[in-house]
Amino acid sequence: MPALPPCNSVSSVVNFPEKSIFAGSFLDRAARFGVQFGRMDTILILDFGSQTTQLIARRLRDMGAYTEIAPGDADLSRAFPSGLGAAGIKGIILSGSPESVYDEGAAPDRAVYDCGLPLLGICYGLQRMTADMGGAVEALPAREYGRIGVSMPPPGSRRPVSEAGERFLAGFPAGDFAAWMSHGDTITKLAPGFAQVGTSASGFPAVVAHESRPWVGLQFHPEVTHCEGGPEILGAFAFGACLCEGGWTMRRYVDESRDALRARVGEKPVLLLISGGVDSTVAGALLLSVLPRDQVRLLYVDTGLMRKGETENVRAALEKLGAAHLRVALCEDEFLSALSGLSDPEEKRKAIGDLFIKIQEREVALMGLPADCFLAQGTLYTDLIESGKGVGKKARLIKSHHNVASPLVEAKRRAGLIIEPLDRLYKDEARALGRLLGVGEEVVGRHPFPGPGLAVRVPGEVTKERCDVLREADAIYMEELKRRKTAGGRSLYDDIWQAFAVLLPVRSVGVAGDLRKYGWVLALRAVASADGMSADAYPFEARDLLEISARITNEVPEIGRVVYDISSKPPATIEWE
Ligand code: XMP
């Protein structure tokens, strides 16, 4: 795991937004889809900007506790006029932050302290509770960072705390343990009513709990894998302190979606644009499993910039899932002529995007759908963050080049006719849902593929010949990655976050028999990454690369030379254009 950026560091800049009521996030979604809070016990995570907020949510969901993230300063009183408990919220976690509570650090709504629900403050979250309740937080002379020992008092040798606090503490490792810390501030005076339970190796409060209220806090990060007993500690908060029911499963998600989607769309047709990737295919699988199949209308545009066999695979996968109305538009010629003569990456992207919109409108019109049909999208929970729509809007990861909004999407959004049936799911959950619904492993486990397809993997001008050569070479590369195994027995393909080949607009000298030959240069790319935001070149065994290279040059005569791209991101990007 990459090193955590330090918390409470003055150098990090976070623009805290004005006080918000998080319209556009999960509340808005609840209203739009009729997913009622109260059906599912929820742990609400208030995000103050820590890089690990998402990890807290993921860890709890993996254990079956449903989580939602909202901005740390969300106006909860307005968002939940009937109270947080009435909305199914069983407990609240206050996340870490790069800010300091005595500086610009944002504060939660007072409702957090008045609602009577269990609270867990993590790092900044604990310091926030301490400062808000009358304690003191100051800068440490030397920051605590990395693995730090925490000592817990032997059973029976400390003051009792609240009942919820006792249930929480029962989940801790017995005796001392190694926690993971990253903070430049510490509590120098506990707020009235709080007791120090655990102490860090440097002598500062590491675990605190209130004597009468269900409030607990940790100076360390239980969500980070290096923290000993971390999942148990988080689980002890959700299931112990909050008595959360823990029924979050993909089976339940399907059941809830069935009711919510049927109620929302009634008998109207639902149009879904299929890209062939995981998200749109799983969204299609979900629609097909919860709505009558005649209601689900699918459109797939083959741009001619797809990988080998992709269109046939998409068709077969969707038919296996029961698709009765799949329109496949074969548009290779149109895209290649739009790209003819273009070599600037941005011009290529724009030409593809503009044509895609035109074709989309034309094809949708040909499908003869009523004007008020719904449009479904495979938006995931993390996409709501990346497009800045408001779930935990402190996260600043914005991919501007993705999913350009088309007039069709905009019109449907304005008319309130968009449904995003995966928008409560993380990518791993979408994959699990896909498996449950019978989506094949070749789709569910597929590496990401950019919207502009092979056009960004053929630097310079895109021609049919170049795409065909690249398709052949890429298919061999993928086949080899799926066949070859790591020492642990996993396929290299599954071990790699994303791999592909790039056909360089360069010819180099080689020999074929006794003759001089000019062949194209092919670059292989493979990266290890958690989210595509940063990446390292995959550390192949040399033998794998040598054998893959030999197979490509043997079987694709146009290619004379194979190189491996060893750049990390940053400074390089994953794609070459
Ligand atoms: P970069 O190249 O920016 O890629 O490091 C990060 C991730 O995004 C994918 N990517 C795209 N996806 N449209 C897309 O839908 C695009 O224009 C695009 N460009 C890059 C890339 O494959 C990687 O997974």
Image (spheres, grey):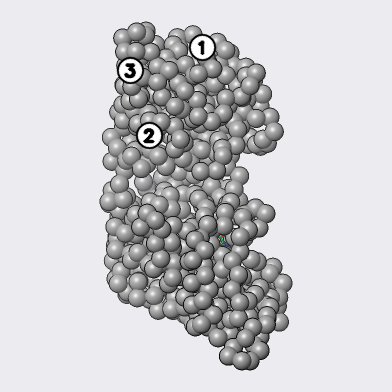
Q: Earlier in the sequence, mark 3 or mark 1?
A: 3
**Residue 201 locus on image (x, y percent):** 50, 18
Question: Residue 18: horizontal and vertical position, in percent?
Answer: 63, 34
Q: Which sits in the foreground, 337 or 187?
A: 187
Tell me which amino acid carries mark 2: Pro
Name the kind of residue labelled 1 in the image. Ala
Q: Is residue 287 left or right of residue 341?
A: left
Cβ–Cβ under 8 Å for marks 3 and 1: no
| Disc 3 residue crowd, few under 14, some 14–19, many 20+, Cα 10 Å | some
- Which residue was labeled with disc 2? 231
Q: Which residue does the numbered mark 3 point to in the structure image?
A: 166
- Please report whichever mark, 3 or 2, sits nearer to the chain's N-terminal start: 3
**Ligand 1 occupies quarter:** bottom right
Q: Is residue 354 left or right of residue 472?
A: right
The structure residue drawn at horizontal position 50% and vertical position 16%, both measured from the top left corner, is 205
Q: Position of residue 360 (x, y in %)?
A: 53, 74
Q: Amino acid at mark 3?
A: Glu
Q: Which residue is mark 1?
A: 191
Q: Are marks 3 and 2 in contact (CB under 8 Å)?
A: no
Relative depth, front residue between 162 and 445? 445
In the foreground, 483 or 387:
483
Mark found first going from the N terminus, 1 or 2 = 1
Mark 1, other Cα within 10 Å: few <14 / some 14–19 / many ≥20: some
Badge 3 marks a residue whose secondary structure is helix
Asked where in the image residue 368 lies, by quadrant, the reply is bottom left
Helix, strand or loop status at disc 1: loop
Q: CA distance from mark 3 to mark 1?
A: 19 Å
**Callout in the foreground (3, 2):** 2
* Pair 3/1: label in front: 3
At a point 35% along the width and 25% down the height, the residue shown is: 173
Q: Position of residue 353 (x, y in %)?
A: 61, 70
Q: CA distance from mark 3 to mark 2?
A: 17 Å
